[in-house]
Image (cartoon, rainbow, N blue to C red):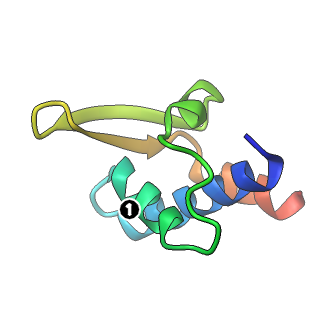
Amino acid sequence: MAHSGARRAIEVTCQVARENEAYGEFAGSDVIRRLLGEPGGAAIPNLRMLVSYGLLEKTGTARGHRRAYYRVVDLAGTEQALRLL
């Protein structure tokens, strides 16, 4: 994954997490859909890589395990790290 693509994926993930803060989790498809709507398309096909980085935690699934839900492990820390890059 290209550095700029990973950064953008993390930025969008943080935006979606903030928008869904009241629920405590968000659908990964919301992040991917938003990335696909941007010029150049999605930088990543799913959020598994962000889970492997330790930025996200999978909280569950729905719709016959076809929709995954996540939470950002440290949203404020992740946003601060993005500002420092």
Q: Nearer the viewer, residue 15 or 39?
A: 39
In the picture as drawn, the residue positioned furthest to the left comes out as 64
**Quadrant of the drawing holding the N terminus:** top right
Q: Position of residue 68 (x, y in %)?
A: 30, 39
- Kindly identify which residue carries mark 1: 21
In the picture as drawn, the residue positioned furthest to the front comes out as 40
Q: Position of residue 29 (x, y in %)?
A: 35, 52
Task: Tell me which corner region of the image, top left, top right, bottom left or bottom right, holds residue 70.
Answer: top left
Q: Position of residue 78 (x, y in %)?
A: 68, 50
Image side of residue 5 versus residue 84, left or right: left
Residue at x-position 56% and y-position 57% = 42
In the picture as drawn, the residue positioned furthest to the top comes out as 52
Q: Is residue 56 visible?
A: yes
Task: Tell me which corner region of the image, top left, top right, bottom left or bottom right, holds residue 82.
Answer: bottom right
- 6 up-or-down from 58: above or below: below
- 1 up-or-down from 8: above or below: above
In the picture as drawn, the residue positioned furthest to the right comes out as 85
**Quadrant of the drawing holding the C terminus:** bottom right
Q: Is residue 27 visible?
A: no
Image side of residue 18 versus residue 65, left or right: right
Q: Nearer the viewer, residue 33 or 51?
A: 33
Dot 1 falls on a residue whose secondary structure is loop
Q: Nearer the viewer, residue 80 or 14?
A: 14
Query: For the residue carrying disc 1, how many other residues have a C-alpha within 10 Å: few (<14), some (14-19), or many (20+)?
Result: some
- 59 up-or-down from 11: above or below: above
Q: Position of residue 58 (x, y in %)?
A: 38, 32
Residue at x-position 10% and y-position 32% = 64
Three-letter residue code for mark 1 = Glu
Image side of residue 68 versus residue 79, left or right: left
Residue at x-position 41% and y-position 70% = 19
Residue at x-position 63% and y-position 53% = 10
